[in-house]
Image (cartoon, helix red, strand yellow):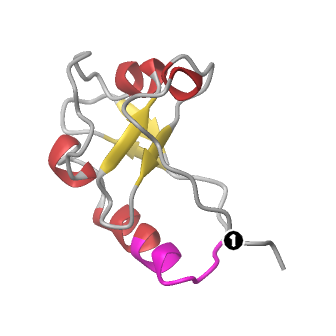
């Protein structure tokens, strides 16, 4: 069993902001705590402050299935998948 660890993210921490991967940290209400610059670029978002905003308000085109996966994870259910390609309404695609 993995011990429970709690830490607080204050603002867009440099170790997340400048991460070389697409990364976002969410709270239990699915609000953004922090995110990498690459996460913003991957989702074609401006560099404005999105911290504290509900993930599905920032990314309204996210598939409903993704919301279900996150909700189940928050309920403590584990799952495994290799990702799924999602085509956005504008024709661009992203993997989840």
Q: Where in the figure is residue 19, as x and y percent of width and height? A: 59, 22
Q: Residue at x 21, y 52 (%)?
A: 54
Q: Is residue 30 above or below residue 90?
A: below
72 within the magenta span: yes
| Camera-side residue of 66 and 15 | 15
The N terminus lies in quadrant: bottom right
Region of the chain picked out in magenta, as a range? 71-79
| Camera-side residue of 15 and 41 | 15
Q: Residue at x 29, y 53 (%)?
A: 31
**Horizontal side, residue 25 vs residue 82: left or right:** left
Q: Is residue 90 above or below residue 65?
A: above
Residue where numbered disc 1 is placed: 4
> Toward which corner of the image does residue 58 lie, by quadrant?
top left
Q: Where in the figure is residue 29, as x and y percent of width and height? A: 30, 66
14 within the magenta span: no
Query: How many numbered tags mark residues here?
Result: 1
Q: Where in the figure is residue 38, as x and y percent of width and height? A: 47, 20
């Amino acid at each position: 069993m993995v011990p429970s660890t709690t830490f607080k993210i204050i603002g867009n921490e440099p170790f997340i902001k400048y991460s070389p991967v697409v990364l976002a940290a969410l709270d239990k209400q699915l609000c953004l705590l922090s995110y990498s610059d690459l996460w913003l670029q991957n989702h074609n978002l401006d560099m404005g402050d999105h911290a504290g905003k509900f993930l599905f308000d920032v990314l309204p085109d996210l598939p409903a299935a993704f919301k279900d996966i996150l909700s189940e994870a928050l309920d403590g259910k584990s799952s495994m998948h290799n990702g799924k390609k999602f085509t956005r309404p504008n024709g661009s695609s992203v993997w989840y």
